Image: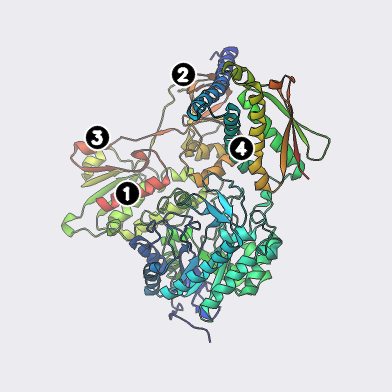
Amino acid sequence: MPVNAEKEIAKLWRNVHSAQAENCKTYYRWREVALELAGPDVKPLDVGLKAAEMMGKDIGKDFLPRTNWLKGEEGFMMNLGKALAGLWITEGGLATAEKGDAPGEIFIKCTRDPWPTVAKQYGVPMEEVAQARERLFQTILEDVSVFMNIPVKIEMLKAIPRGEGMYLFRLYKEN
Amino acid sequence: MAKQLFEWDYSSYPGAKSYPHLFKPIQIGNLTIPNRIKYAATEDNLNDHNGFVTDADVAYLKRRAEGVVGGMCFMQGVYMDEARKGQGYVGQAACWNDKFIPGLKRLADAIHEEKAIAGFQLMDCGRVGAVEVDAGHGPSTVPQRLRIFKPMYEMTHAEVKEMIQQHVDAAKRGIEAGFDIIEISGIVGYLISNFLSSYTNRRTDEYGGDVRGRSQSMIEIIQGVKEVCGPDIPLGIRLCSEELLDDVRGNTPDESMITYQLAEEAGADYISCTLGWQESIYPVISRDIPQGNWLHLAKRAKAHVKIPIQMAYRLFTPDKPNKAIGDGELDIWEMCRSMIADPLMPKKVLEGREDEIRHCVACNLCLARLFRDAPMTCYINPLCAHEHDEKFYPSPVEADEQKEVMIVGAGPAGLECAYVAAQRGHDVHVYDKRQEPGGTLLEASRAPYGDEELMTCIHYQKTMCEKAGVEFHLGTEVTDSLVQEEMPDTVVLATGPVYSKIQGLGADRNNVVNVLDVMGGKVEVGDKVVVWGNRKPGIGVALHLAKQGKKVTIVGKEKSAGFDINPSFKWRYMIYLRQNGVMAYNDCDIEEISEGEIMVRTYDGYRFPVECDTVVVSEREANASLKNVVQGEGIEVFVIGDALLPRNLSSAVHDGYRIGLRI
């Protein structure tokens, strides 16, 4: 029963990467559709941010069934951070969630992100990519905050598309 | 002097001697209830989508009213707002206008015709409502945890007042329709429970704050409805004794008990004790929860209030509620699903016919259908929700139409068909090569997490067969020559499925065994087992083996494991698979079996090995054996159950019932 593990894994890997690339491309293709339908008076950045909001709202709904207070505030915040990092990893990013110094503070780092590369191919400004990511995460957390009755916030400290070498987000509970 | 609506004397019935506490009266408010039995309000989706009562619902409820033998029979909860935000089910009855009273009166009359006490329930579904509109209402805007529910928005102070008045107005209509008891539903995520819970109520006005404030709307509803009821009509409320929402910071059990005390102080005459919300992450009523598991909550409730306490959850047989009532831990035995499965269940208990009870198997198919806007049905009761349709009842055949019927297979399909056909007057013979009836359920019921309850179906069917005069030929394999020798008028093939053969290399190795042999303990399996097939039989055997400490991997062609299990129960199995370390490779097949491992191939061609010393085959196919022979002899033939198409217990029972009516 010979199986060439290297070959099988390589095939799987190629397909995963293709799916991730296709995911990015599909988004930007739809962005072009939206811009064309919206007409010349609409700012592309506004469309991009609105899309991030709508997607974030929907992704946030998927977070709710797994949102859980049984491990207390620290566990809750870390789970949120891991969920956001995990989302990025699924898209092809290289992301981690790490505990900060302040209580409940989590830092999400992403040192590789496929979105800017694909955005460039579709002529999308880098600043839109950065702002859309921040808006996406903020919107995901909106429903989570209301659901748990905890003011969870996230802010972008660094962004790859701004030439800062990495994304760095600070996830925290607003006092 | 308390009022008694109907005279009942149970003293001559055997059930009253076996279960004396169930058949003794109790006073609720100023009304004497002859026994301790209640069919609790249960949605059935049988009504008109505009809220008007239908013939189907009247017939459904009348049958349950007959079953409670003088006890309480509640109609489903009604929604009370014209905007339909409180409507949680497409076929839910409405009561926001006087135009609904005639239909409601039909229900009350139907219950009274059976000399039972007619209960009317007020139910704004709140967070789980708005089934026909875009958005629902609640004390605060808290996002839905489950996507199937509509977004909901915070009610203004005026809207809260209006909602309270809607309860009062609807209660008036219920009384005008002729109901004897009014009940308020405050459970599982419905509006009252939303107000009570710290999870969903973040208001800062008088309807929010601490548990006293969160209870204020409930208190005003009870007080308002109580005034309408007057001294003669009791008022009850269903309340969570535990929300099971600690993961989202819901009420503590102590807070829930405070809501019980506040309800009593406000004027409630009884409390129906429930637990859990629809969005709780803990199981409450599925088969994996032992019978009587929640009685301690009724006991605790009784320690906190003086009014009678009622309870339904996982009390399917009379012994436990009888004892609990005798021990002073419970006052009234409620039933929902157990009387969906057998509407005459308590009547059979009273008459000493317990062996004729078709027990609920706690599969929650009834709930799954309600949440998908489908009319109620029951996994094991084919007549459920068809009570109004005479075609669904066994009708006697004329003497010259009586047939000799050979039923091949004494599983659930064959037995169901057998007793129904025999009741109609046919001469029915059931053959099975095994020595005992049950078919593949004999093995399936050995799976863990409560599956032994599945055998109650066989016990019921066997009793009914015996009482209907069915002749059993157990230990007799039906062959071509036996068919030719007997030459019956009709043959029903209920032989169960055949098990598929693995198409890959090595399928004939002696470490490939059949699921029935494994579950029956006829073969030994190794420590690393692969189960081929990811439907219910595969999951059952996987859990059975994992419980023995074996490393189990499921390989199956379906896209998700257990896709054939109804969604209201499937989540339990998925959790158990994870807890027992069972890995499932879905969308996959076995390409090759060799020494110590198998090769798995995904639907799109990836291959990977899995360590394995035994392969258990659970994939099934239709069974066409005997069909050609029977047809060749010109004999009428029916194929039912898994022999027709491998499915589940429900399909077997429903197939059997329908063919039993047709022969």
Residue at mark 2 to residue at mark 3: CA–CA distance: 31 Å
Dot 4 or dot 3: first in sequence order is 4
- SS under mark 2: loop
Question: Which one is in front, B63 or B514?
Answer: B63
**How many other residues sit within 10 Å of disc 2, few (<14), some (14-19) or many (≥20)?**
some
User: Is B50 rendered above or below residue A154?
Assistant: below
Residue at mark 4 to residue at mark 1: CA–CA distance: 41 Å
Residue drawn 78% across the image and 40% down it? A104
Can residue B547 be seen here?
no
Residue drawn 41% across the image and 62% down it? B343
Q: Mark 2 points at which residue?
A: B505
Residue at mark 4 to residue at mark 3: CA–CA distance: 45 Å
Dot 2 or dot 3: first in sequence order is 2
User: Is B641 rendered above or below residue B136?
Assistant: above
Q: Mark 1 points at which residue?
A: B430
Q: What residue type is labelled 1?
A: Val
Give residue B628's mark.
Answer: 3
The subunit letter for the residue under badge 4 reads: B
Which quarter of the picture shows residue A153?
A: top right
Question: Which one is in front, B70 or B439?
Answer: B70
Residue at mark 2 to residue at mark 4: CA–CA distance: 30 Å
Nearer the camera: disc 2 or disc 4: 4
- SS under mark 4: helix
Residue at mark 3 to residue at mark 1: CA–CA distance: 20 Å
- Contact between marks 2 and 4 (CB within 8 A): the answer is no
Nearer the camera: disc 4 or disc 1: 4
Q: Which amino acid does label 4 sit on?
A: Arg
The answer to whether dots 2 and 1 both sit on one chain is yes
Nearer the camera: disc 4 or disc 3: 4
Q: Name the residue under label 4.
A: B578
| Residue B153 x, y percent position in the rendering | 58, 52
